[in-house]
Image (cartoon, rainbow, N blue to C red):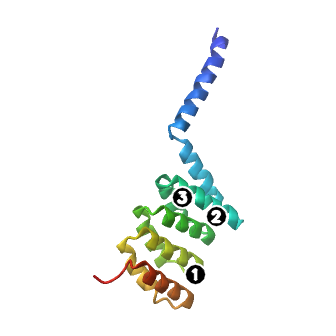
Amino acid sequence: MPVKYAPVRRVVSVLAVLFFCLAGFGCQRNEVNREIGHLHDTDKEVRQEAVKALVRIGPPAVEPLIKALKEKNPDVQAAAAKALGLIGDKRAVMPLVDMMKNSYNVELMFEIAVALTQIGDERACGALQTASRNSSNLISSAARKVLSQSGLCKQK
């Protein structure tokens, strides 16, 4: 007799998985994890597409992206910073500020500076002002440009 019910159980379990996916439970987490994995790709276009996908997902991608900032690969870090800036969630401000204080990679620092201004939180001002005085001309000029164009840190 149990054999008769096995196909019914399979159908019910498949329907339950579909329900959870359609309701947004679990499937979004899988999609976030898959796209975070694509940030590790050596192909820049693959990373760019992953950033776009993570931005479409929005706030559920923020915590995994913050974790990606801690990766050793600066390309992964830069892509994560870019996605966080485009999402614009304020949870990313302090991790981005910390990353800016501890990074010497020009591309990464630029992406962080842009991300911080896109988020638009005044807590980023100190880090951006410090970057504007960086010994690297590229970093300091990028930070000054971001500061002047964003209006984020204007004196009140």
Per the image, the residue denoted by label 1 is 106
Residue 41 in sight in this render: no
Mark identifier at residue 19: none
Quarter of image, res 27: top right
Instruction: Please tell me which residue lies in front, 18 or 155.
Output: 155
Instruction: Please tell me which residue lies in front, 53 or 67.
Output: 53
Q: Residues within 10 Å of mark 2 (few under 14, many from 20)?
A: some
Per the image, the residue denoted by label 3 is 55
- Distance in Å between CA atoms under marks 2 and 1: 18 Å
Q: Position of residue 56 (x, y in %)?
A: 54, 55
Element under label 2? helix
Per the image, the residue denoted by label 2 is 48
Residue projecting furthest to the top:
1
Q: Residues within 10 Å of mark 1 (few under 14, many from 20)?
A: some
Say which quadrant the C terminus sits in: bottom left
Q: Amino acid at mark 2?
A: Gln
Instruction: Please tell me which residue lies in front, 79 or 120.
Output: 120
- Distance in Å between CA atoms under marks 1 and 3: 23 Å
Quarter of image, res 19: top right
Q: Amino acid at mark 1?
A: Val
